[in-house]
Image (tube, grey):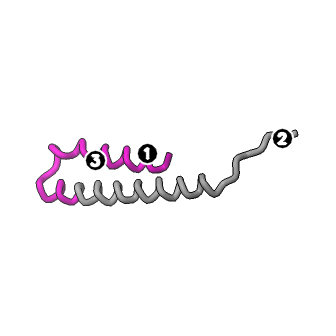
């Protein structure tokens, strides 16, 4: 969910690889790494919340 959106932004930055200078690309790679870590963290939190949330019971 949110992790996927973060990963999509991370992957979209790759489009800039051949459009920016070496220094700028190095900065964008750092950004990509940070986004990957953020996506991993969000997915871990989402799994934990899903495990704590009781399944909905059908209305009677």
* Displayed quadrant of residue 15: top left
The boundaries of the magenta stretch are 1-27
Q: Position of residue 50 (x, y in %)?
A: 60, 52
Residue at which label 2 appears: 59
Foreground mark, 3 or 2, reads: 2
Residue at which label 1 appears: 4
* Displayed quadrant of residue 14: top left
Q: Residues within 10 Å of mark 2 (few under 14, many from 20)?
A: few
Q: Is residue 57 left or right of residue 36?
A: right
Q: Secondary structure at mark 3?
A: helix
Dominant secondary structure (helix, strand or loop) of the stretch shown in magenta: helix
Residue ID at (43%, 45%): 4
Residue ID at (70%, 47%): 55
Q: Position of residue 48 (x, y in %)?
A: 55, 57
Separation (CA) of disc 2 from disc 1:
32 Å
Q: Secondary structure at mark 2?
A: loop
Foreground mark, 2 or 1, reads: 2
Residue ID at (24%, 55%): 28
In the rendering, which numbered label is found on residue 26?
none
Residue at which label 3 appears: 13
């Amino acid at each position: 969910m949110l992790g996927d959106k973060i990963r999509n932004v991370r992957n979209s930055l790759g489009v800039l690889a051949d459009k920016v200078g070496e220094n700028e690309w190095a900065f964008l790679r750092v950004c990509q790494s940070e986004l990957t870590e953020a996506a991993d963290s969000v997915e871990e939190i989402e799994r934990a919340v899903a495990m704590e949330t009781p399944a909905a019971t059908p209305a009677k």
